[in-house]
Image (tube, coloured by chain):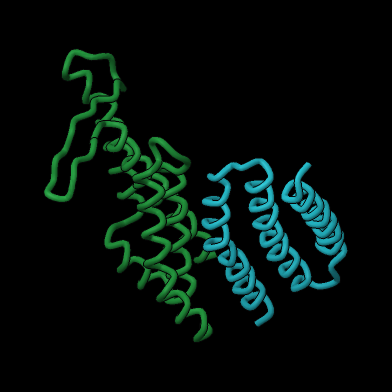
Chain colours: A green, B cyan
Amino acid sequence: MTSRWLCIITQFLTPLLLMLSVFLLLRGHNEPGGGFAGGLVAACALALHMFAFGETAMRKVLMINPRTLSGIGLVVAVFSGFLPALAQLPAFTGLWFDLTTPIGSTKLGTPILFDVGVYMTVLGVCVSLMEDLHQE
Amino acid sequence: MNFLEVATTVSLVFLSTALALILIRIKQGPTTSDRVVGLDLTAIILIGVLCATAVRFSVESLLDVAVALALVIFLGTVALAKFVGRNSS
């Protein structure tokens, strides 16, 4: 039923869009981007996959119920907010620590965890919305 | 005003004119297909506006927006095409 060109383009474009979404997620703290924009781009990638190959194939790519994913994302975001409270700091304080790897050192912190939570929430909500629209 | 500023300003004026014409087409459009093509063209012209604005005011981050928009924007056309195809069949 779906056109062959759509299937071919989807096979190239879905990984590209997913990579772009992760890129947006990771650069979000200092430059434009962030969890919300990254989640929207990832949802677009999955919507494209759903248009080309159908809903069951998209669920296989996602590997998890989108509603469960959005719930996990909320829990992760709230947990990252209350992590500084365990260290006797005001809630939602940004905690940073250096991570040194063989290829260089970088900074990790609770804002990244918060962004990952937002990413998962936005992805789950948008995918479940599009599934409902697709079923109509 | 140097040449680059003149060029980007003129291109922004032309793009705005094109956008206005497309809006008329979307409003009148005898068939749904005309409206779908008009919406797609709106997005493409929007990418042009973003790039011209990025050059004119030297805002680098607008180029990232243009890249993301260019990757994502045809999704709406695909969705509308699916919708139109399902309604007609």
How far across and down, in percent of the image, does residue B66 sit? 58, 54
Closer to the camera in the image, B19 or B75: B19
How far across and down, in percent of the image, does residue A60 sit? 30, 68
Quadrant (top left, top right, bottom left, bottom right) of the C terminus of chain A: bottom right
How far across and down, in percent of the image, does residue A75 sit? 28, 36
The residue lying at 34 percent from left, 66 percent from top is: A59
Closer to the camera in the image, B23 or B48: B48
View extreme (front): residue = B2
Numbered marks: total: 0
Closer to the camera in the image, A39 or A129: A39
The residue lying at 51 percent from left, 79 percent from top is: A6
The residue lying at 62 percent from left, 68 percent from top is: B77
Left or right for A87, reference B58: left
Query: Within the image, what quadrant is residue A27 found in?
Result: top left
Left or right for A130, reference B85: left
Task: Note whether B33 is above or below B11 in the view shown.
Answer: below
Left or right for A27, reference B2: left
Task: Note whether B39 is above or below B1 in the view shown.
Answer: below
Closer to the camera in the image, A90 or B45: B45
How far across and down, in percent of the image, does residue B24 sit? 87, 59
